[in-house]
Amino acid sequence: MASKAGDWRNYKRVLLPPVKDLHRLDVYEDHGGYDALRQALTTDKWDPASVTDEVKKSGLRGRGGAGFPTGLKWTFMPPVNPDVPRFICCNADESEPGTFKDRQVMEYNPHLVFEGMVLAGYAMTIKTAYLYVRGEYADWITHMERELEKAYAKGYVGENIMGSDFSMDIVIHKGAGAYICGEESSLMNSLEGRRAYPRIKPPFPAQKGIWNYPTTINNVETFAHVPLILSKGADWFSSIGAPSSPGPVLYGISGHVNRPGVYEYPSGMLISDLIDEVAGGMRGGKKLKAVVPGGSSVPVLRADMIDGVTMDPEGLRDAGSMLGTAGMLILDQDTDMVSFLRRITHFYHHESCGQCTPCREGTGWLENIVTRIDEGEGNVKDLDLLIDLCSQMEGRTVCALADAAAWPVRHTITRFREEFEAKCRPSLVATHVESAAV
Amino acid sequence: MTDFIKDPVVSLPDRMPEPVIPGDELFFTDEEKKQIETWVSRYPTADGAVMRVLWLAQEKFSFLPAEVVQLVANALDMPYAKVYGVATFYTQYFKEKKGKYVFDVCTCFSCQWCGGYDMLHYLEEKLRVHAGETTGDGLFTIQEAECLGACGSAPMLQITNGPYVHNLTREKIDALIDALREGNMPAFESVTLPQDEDELSGNRRTDVDKTTSSVTPPVSETVK
Ligand SMILES: Cc1cc2nc3c(=O)[nH]c(=O)nc-3n(C[C@H](O)[C@H](O)[C@H](O)COP(=O)(O)O)c2cc1C
Ligand code: SF4
Ligand code: FES
């Protein structure tokens, strides 16, 4: 398989174009900022339905982890009823370990996010949008509030935007530290001033969202694409990168590479290109051991599994993993995969909201048993016990956190079995791992 | 306790423990009340503003004992139990008194493999307290944090829910502690995008004094 990213070496960035001080409103305006919104609100070119159609046509898929087609999601909103309020939520909770791209967009191009949110509001006839930012991003919240105030003053947000009869408010909501708030229904409960327990779905947010009113929720990067799609056209967008999930992608690369950081490139990049050429190769010339391609929840890939694998949902599915948030952790030969898994299980145990028994108890047992193995106190049979535990958690809970906790366990054990066995006490009984996974 | 239960078989939980904030300090100023009103006006119900008001209360009283939770509940006309439920759900709200400076050292996922534990242990040794504890002078608390969304500049820490310190080294920690002892909070540090280094020869922001670029993560000596 070859790269689906085309001539990526000559790719020109659009989400984070190389412009000094683009985060400032005056600079943003000088570089075509709010032009897409102006065209939508003050000319006949775009009526609300055609904005949604254009987003649909572009093939944009959500960048929050699940990869759901954005235009299609917008059509789930019920017909406008003037007596029923409806909302937009921008998900800036970004807490998936290994993910740090949304923070860079909020720091370097916040107006693109605001413009995308207002355009989405116009497309779905929505008057209020909440931008839910994780509480740890306090500094970035301050920066964004300052820029948002300027956007209000210039009439890009607020009453009668650009003299049109469309009005919309953006409210920045500050979280207070809980990974689960990234889950959309938990985020909605958090916004309402409750404990952030996820809700059972259905009903989906478009039917019953915040305060039980119709709500559409998208990720920061997803909204940031919208003004670009309108100003450059759906065809432009869909011609970039992998056809099944097109467009620019922010790859957050961390771990044992020479140049970690957030990079903007077309979707469908080869993992090997991202490591060797984009991120400057492995630290200290060490050998690659493993790649986690999309945040801690997605299955880890062994170095021998990444040959020809591209960063798009289909490419990664065929390789036995998922795109997730495209936050890639690169690990070298010295990494202890048992210790690696131990820290991941600790994370999910800490972050489980505690509503569902399989998740609350299961994540705790995952951590206990992996810790036991890591300390040299485990038995080989514990590995089967862990896989069995995963099967009892997956698909049995209110939200996907339990699955997200189980996948890394299942796949790290099956893919690095020898390493786990080497840390266990020897067994005289035959053991096997039941797993459909590669 | 009512009179007729002389000798309770079980000790009943104290719903309202002894207050620690003196009664005459326990109020919101007019200015703060106006700020709360503005927040409330942004949500269909006042409950939506509870997280912001808890933040305000924590900044003012440094943590959230029961009487502060009650104050927030009164300000928003919400039941105490509901506000208490929110205050205890999120890790950034402090339920007990912490040090003046709280270090949230990320040891999660990427940071684990880029020296996060080295930095945590170095801090523990330097300040002679364990993660979760506060120094005797009440100045520093050390905590182990989950991913703070700065994995590219690992290892890193956050100071008291405020500024991030990226690409930690022992020297950086030494300098940080010295500065904090003098009462100087570090300034905002902007992480330069690697592509900006190539195309803009540095950080794109001209309004920040401190920038840090992506560096090769240190080889960790201790991973746990
Ligand atoms: C446990 C859990 C955590 C999540 N965390 C985030 C997050 O931090 N940021 C985010 O954008 N989406 C997160 N999601 C996905 C959201 O539920 C939702 O699918 C997404 O925000 C939709 O936006 P999109 O369609 O633009 O991707 C999380 C999902 C789960 C199950
Ligand atoms: S799966 Fe876990 S995190 Fe999700 S609702 Fe259930 S207990 Fe909470
Ligand atoms: S893992 Fe430490 S900031 Fe993400």
Image (tube, rainbow, N blue to C red):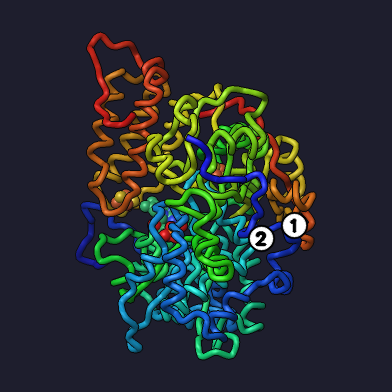
From the viewer's perspective, tell me whether residue A429 is left or right of residue B168.
Answer: left
Q: Residue at x 69, y 42 (%)?
A: B214
**How many other residues sit within 10 Å of disc 2, few (<14), some (14-19) or many (≥20)?**
many
Q: Residue at x 67, y 72 (%)?
A: A32
Q: Is residue B25 visible?
A: yes
* Residue B208, picture quadrant: bottom right
Which residue bears the numbered disc 1?
A: B204
Chain letter for mark 2, please: A
* Amino acid type assigned to the residue bearing label 2 in the image: Tyr
**Front residue of A403 and A289:** A289
Compute the Cα span from label 1 to label 2.
Answer: 8 Å
In this view, A45 is above or below A102: below
In this view, A154 is above or below B156: below
**Front residue of A197 and A299:** A299
Q: Is residue B128 visible?
A: no
Q: Which mark is residue A108?
A: 2
Q: Position of residue B79 (x, y in %)?
A: 35, 73
- Looking at the rendered structure, the secondary structure element under dot 1 is loop
Q: Position of residue A134 (x, y in %)?
A: 51, 59
* Residue A342, picture quadrant: top left
Q: Residue at x 31, y 80 (%)?
A: A79
- Looking at the rendered structure, the secondary structure element under dot 2 is helix
Q: Residue at x 65, y 83 (%)?
A: A153
* Residue B7, picture quadrant: bottom left
* Amino acid type assigned to the residue bearing label 1 in the image: Arg
Q: Position of residue B59 (x, y in %)?
A: 58, 65
In this view, B55 is above or below B99: below
> Do the residues bearing badges 1 and 2 touch, measured as CB atoms within 8 Å?
yes
**Front residue of A353 and A56:** A56
Q: Which mark is residue A151?
A: none
